[in-house]
Image (cartoon, grey):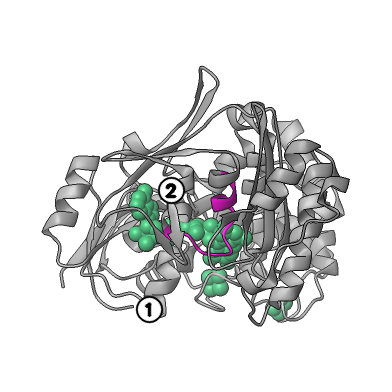
């Protein structure tokens, strides 16, 4: 690991000002993406700004049909929260399938979405459940948050504070996990919200996306058979050592059917 | 670059330790506090041999910065039992032959205890999925799973007697 200055601010304002003063600062949440990348010297920040003492970034609340989860909430807390289970059990299922027990005890929802790994699970929840991302400066609609591989619409130094999930009629998340890391080779979130159906797919392409052809087909009739003639074009998907684009396209259909069956 | 000073509790004792800002918790435990029972296998959060309890929960100490442990209550393999009086999880690993070379064992035991404490060790499938973050190159896992299941019974009995 390269050298860096380490800070543990107590408030959002203090964290922002440390960021602004640093040459090349980075926020640290659970560290389960950032610390491995520091160790591999893939990242060399001048300052590491640890958010873990900032109380305003914690907590899970359910009010007026909206579930709000603080950015620092660990995957395990989401997986086991009564409020989350009562609001949308698919979100708890998604969190309980991330990595392993130790990873879930440290990794956070804010860190996961800010990082936007193409194989991460949470991005499928943000898009599929029509969430809103709250930052220290504005609210960003989930549909506008993820902009490319490891890229988001966050400005430099902008901090994720929390995420709001509106109420859903039904939702289901199914993934085909990489057998070693548990990251999604393909993960599909299907949700019925009011009269519409949303389908978000992670792991398959360089960035999470909504499968509009599947959404249209399922909007006419919410059943597995509606997906019979809907295919995802492999040309839009990734090929790597874990799976070819054709295999990923096939998995999109299989995982989507399983998700619909689980609604 | 400046060192940082970290205040934490390790195995029940308050500790204040100076260390470089880029130290990890496992560096602090092994190199500075000489608690070498916590092992480092991969150093990249894959193998779980560095598992310790951090505020009561199993975490990989190679993937926590020393500074993040400020104010934390950390328990390592040295803190759960003694030579004279092993923790039920340690006894179960011995009884069930749940180790061969022993390298993964401290991490397995710390992960196993957390699993039992959370009530997630009720059957073989949940023990296997609960130990997904711990890799063993020797045993083939079978006896490790048996050991955790047996310790779960023992720990439950003890809790009832105490409770
Ligand atoms: C062995 C292993 C297996 C894993 N398996 C999975 C898996 O199956 N599925 C999955 O989805 N993920 C998986 N992960 C990743 C894990 O979920 C990470 O915890 C997560 O991606 C990052 O969250 P973090 O809190 O650890 O963030 P950090 O590592 O602390 O930060 C990640 C990035 O986000 C930025 N950041 C953090 N918080 C904020 C914030 N509030 N505002 C703005 N920027 C912020 C940081 O600057 C950094 O660039 C795995 C990780 C490991 C080590
Ligand atoms: S040494 Fe920490 S997970 Fe392998
Ligand atoms: S006993 Fe040798 S690695 Fe597990």
* Nearest the eye: B4 or A38: A38
Q: Is residue B37 visible?
A: no
Q: Chain of mark 2?
A: A
The residue singled out by tag 1 in the image is: A42
- Which residue is labeled 2 in the image? A144
For the residue pair A33 and B126, the one nearer the viewer reads as A33
Q: Position of residue A215 (x, y in %)?
A: 69, 45
Label 1: few (<14), some (14–19) or many (≥20) C-alpha neighbours in 10 Å: few
Residue in the image at 64% along x and 65% along y: A204
The Cα atoms of the two marked residues, 1 and 2, are separated by 27 Å
Total residue callouts: 2
Q: Is residue A179 above or below residue A218?
A: below
Q: Chain of mark 1?
A: A
Front position among marks 1 and 2? 2
Residue A191 sits inside the magenta stretch: no
Q: Is mark 2 within 8 Å of ligand 1?
A: no
Q: Which residues are magenta?
A: A115-125
Q: Residue B70 in the image: x percent, y percent?
A: 32, 51
The residue located at (50%, 76%) in the rendering is: B43
Q: Residue at x 64, y 74 (%)?
A: A235
Question: Which x, y percent locates residue A182?
Answer: 66, 64
Instruction: Give the position of the N terminus of chain B as an image quadrant.
Output: bottom left
Seen in the image, is A7 located left or right of residue A28? left
Q: Residue A186 lies in what quarter of the image? A: bottom right
């Amino acid at each position: 690991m390269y050298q860096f200055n380490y800070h543990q601010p107590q408030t959002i304002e203090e964290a922002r000002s440390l960021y602004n003063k640093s040459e090349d600062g980075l926020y640290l949440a659970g560290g389960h993406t950032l610390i491995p990348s520091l160790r591999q010297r893939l990242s060399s920040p001048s300052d590491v700004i640890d958010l873990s003492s900032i109380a305003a970034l914690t907590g899970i609340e359910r009010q007026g049909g909206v579930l709000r989860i603080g950015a620092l909430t660990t995957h395990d807390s989401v997986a086991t929260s009564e409020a989350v289970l009562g609001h949308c059990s698919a979100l708890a299922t998604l969190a309980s399938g991330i990595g392993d027990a130790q990873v879930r005890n440290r990794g956070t929802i804010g860190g996961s979405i800010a990082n936007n790994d193409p194989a991460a699970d949470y991005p499928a929840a943000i898009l599929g459940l029509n969430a809103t991302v709250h930052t220290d400066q504005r609210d960003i609609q989930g549909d506008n948050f993820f902009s490319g591989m490891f890229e988001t619409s966050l400005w430099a130094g902008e901090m994720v504070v929390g995420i709001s999930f509106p109420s859903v009629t039904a939702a289901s998340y199914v993934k085909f996990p990489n057998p070693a890391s548990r990251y999604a080779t393909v993960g599909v979130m299907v949700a019925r919200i009011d009269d519409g159906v949303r389908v978000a797919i992670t792991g398959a392409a360089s960035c999470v996306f909504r499968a509009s052809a599947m959404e249209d087909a399922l909007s006419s009739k919410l059943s597995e058979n509606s997906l019979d003639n809907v295919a995802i074009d492999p040309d839009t998907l990734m090929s790597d050592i874990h799976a070819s684009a054709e295999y990923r396209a096939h998995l999109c259909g299989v995982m989507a059917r399983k998700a619909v069956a689980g609604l | 670059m400046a060192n940082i000073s970290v205040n934490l509790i390790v195995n029940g004792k308050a500790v204040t330790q100076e260390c470089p800002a880029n130290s990890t918790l496992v560096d602090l435990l092994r190199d500075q506090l000489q608690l070498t029972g916590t092992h480092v296998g991969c150093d990249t959060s894959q193998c779980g041999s560095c598992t310790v309890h951090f505020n009561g929960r199993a975490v990989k100490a190679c993937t926590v910065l020393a500074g993040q442990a400020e104010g934390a209550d950390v328990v390592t393999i040295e803190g759960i039992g003694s030579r004279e009086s092993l923790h039920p999880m340690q006894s179960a690993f011995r009884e069930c032959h749940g180790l061969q070379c022993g390298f993964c064992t401290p991490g397995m035991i710390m992960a196993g205890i957390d699993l039992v404490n959370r009530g997630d060790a009720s059957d073989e499938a949940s023990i296997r999925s609960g130990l997904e973050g711990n890799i063993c190159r020797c045993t083939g896992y079978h006896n490790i799973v048996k050991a955790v299941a047996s310790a779960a019974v023992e720990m439950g009995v003890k809790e009832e007697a105490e409770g």
